[in-house]
Image (cartoon, helix red, strand yellow):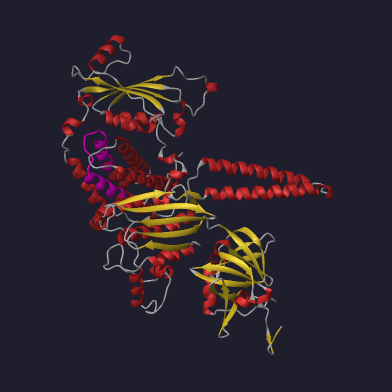
Amino acid sequence: MTIDMEQFKSTYIEESHEGLEVMESKLLELDSGTADKEAINSIFRAAHSIKGGGATFGFADISDFTHVVETLLDEIRNGKRDINHEAIVLFLTSVDVIRDMLTASQQGIEIDQARASEVKQQLEKMLDTPSDDTATAAEPEDNCSTSGWKIHFVPFPEMLARGNDVVRMLRELEDLGTLDVKADVAKLPALEDLNPEECHIGWDIILSGTATRDQINEIFVWVEGDCELTITPLLDTNQSGSVPDHDAKPENKADNAADVTPIKQVLQPKQTPLNASPAAERRVPGTESSSIRVDIEKIDALINMVGELVITQSMLSQLGEDFDMSRCEKLLHGLGQLERNTRELQESVMRIRMIPISFAFNRFPRMIHDMCGKFGKKIELKLTGESTELDKTVMEKIGDPLVHLVRNSLDHGIELPDLRVAAGKPEFGTVHLNAYHQGGNIVIEITDDGAGLNKDKIFAKAVEKGLVESGAVLQDEKIYELLFQPGFSTAEQVTDISGRGVGMDVVKKNIQALGGSVEVATELGSWTKFNIRLPLTLAILDGQLICVGKETYIIPLISIIESLQIDQKSVSAIAGKAELYKLRDEYIPIIRFHHVFGVHTDTLSLDDGLLVVVEGNGSKAALLVDDLLGQQQVVIKSLETNFKKVDGVSGATILGDGTVALILDVAGLIRVAQNGKFQQPRNIIENDGVAA
């Protein structure tokens, strides 16, 4: 039977991306000249996994390149070479190359062989350059002349269940020299008691040849914590190349031990392997992923809830048999239980799609590291609220806007060290990313302690570009909103990351497309904060049902400011064309909903309806509706995918009675009303000037 390896390639690519994130984060933690052994081992294991998987699944280019990276890492972790700034930068560049190779393989496009070859040559050049302490770095024991190694290997019972293969490990040992293996089956249970997923056999192995301890450790690295392992060198005292017998007498073993003290390497409990880490530790790759890793606790909760639903369904089925009115109370109780179970099931399913914001945050340490080196700035990154969860789809779409806002803080916000010191600030600037839940939304804050925004300079640039009149009087928040106008920039010179006026308008559009908003607050010379507010999920929203004529519509609760009865004294008309409602100290335009959508209604007078004050894209409006019907969560169905794009409508949903209700896009609705694109009511027929 042949195994189709294609089915595993996508999993390999996703896990390799995760391995690269481990490598990148650990490399950024390293200090030049200080080899943190735990960090180096984590980086090595990730590279080893990528290399091995590449060879297995036919990604030869990736495997060959990563092999050179792994070899250089091996020298560092064995103390044969120092870790320095040059090596860290080269390893980070290698991570980028491997990531690009994986992405190219995933998308079926050509790998950039020229860049891969260039970086590979740099790695090989570093390998060929001896380190200053090469002669003294290795342990004396590893340098003594040996005829081989004695390995005592006893797996713990659960080792096989974790996907480890003893036969494969023995084959890899055989590649290092001549192998002599003796199995210890003393603990093997009777056949009827045997669990095929448990291991009850140990091995005593003699490996003769020139293999090093590091080569042997590399084979056993994936069973750390899953076995008892002793590796003892066999001294080549007579240069004869003879191999000691397994069954040598105790006194011979003692004599051998007198020359070299055996090293017992009982490995510590291992860290969670890459293919089994919890969802909270994972990051979404740069490209959108078609799969998602889920914490087992969420799956268990979902299974339990399905079980409750099955019990409720069974109870209702029994009530339906020979039903009579005496069972009404039990039926109502069962329906209430069904409603609770359905709601909890919905929440459990939605939790499966929720992943921590750390997936988006984890890309920024590398970005700041690279930009500080390029522009001579000193910046400290502070991350809080990384465990805050939001929907996977929202996560993937918010990544690029976050990147642009952080880059903006780095380039425009944080000053150069000498300027900060002259201003009485610390030499190191701080960029702070924070996330937290607020109601049914997630709030993401990007704050820097840089120069702040100069509102006079922003206003002058807006006047220069014709965005506002020179004599206009704008509130501070309105001035800062000019930053999001297309083509707007206050940069004095164009760099490769800013100054072209491209991006901030796209940032706002992308955030609004997710049903969110972005606000700016600042203090000149001290700080700037960008506040992003997003829905937790794009699949379900909390909505307010409204009635206009015989139609039902849904307004997202996030867009509603308040609802009120109309006071005619607060209504003003402008030249007979527009109506305004004075709400406290603010005049808000009234939008007659039935005009915009062409719906027939008997509520033509303001006295007969209600006003729902809404806000979208920074603009407020008061919608005239017939009545408010209640609030409920609704599942969003795309109107554009199933029909076509409709101005003022973001989607649709199916109500409990089976009817379809349109979900309003408040920003689009206000825009349609402002442009005067009204519809003629569908059931109004002009007949001699009389509406039928």
Question: Image quadrant of residue 255?
Answer: top left
Residue at position x 55%, y 51% in the image: 350
Residue at position x 68%, y 59% in the image: 656
Image quarter (top left, top right, bottom left or bottom right) of the C terminus: bottom right
Residue 335 location (% of width, % of height): 72, 50
On the rendered structure, is 124 left or right of 272? Answer: left
Q: Is residue 176 above or below residue 617?
A: above
Residue 393 location (% of width, % of height): 48, 55
On the rendered structure, is 236 left or right of 539? Answer: left
Q: Nearer the viewer, residue 144 or 369?
A: 369
Name the magenta segment's main secondary structure: helix
77 drawn magenta: yes
Q: Nearer the viewer, residue 15 or 466?
A: 466
253 drawn magenta: no
Residue 657 location (% of width, % of height): 70, 61
Residue at position x 33%, y 70% in the image: 457
Residue 323 location (% of width, % of height): 81, 48
Q: Is residue 417 visible?
A: yes
Residue at position x 40%, y 68% in the image: 480
On the rendered structure, is 675 left or right of 362? Answer: right
Q: Which residues are magenta?
A: 68-95
Q: Nearer the viewer, residue 545 or 650?
A: 545
Count of picture labels: 0
Q: Is residue 289 visible?
A: no
Q: Is residue 673 above or below residue 224?
A: below
Q: Is residue 361 above or below residue 149?
A: below
Question: Image quadrant of residue 658?
Answer: bottom right
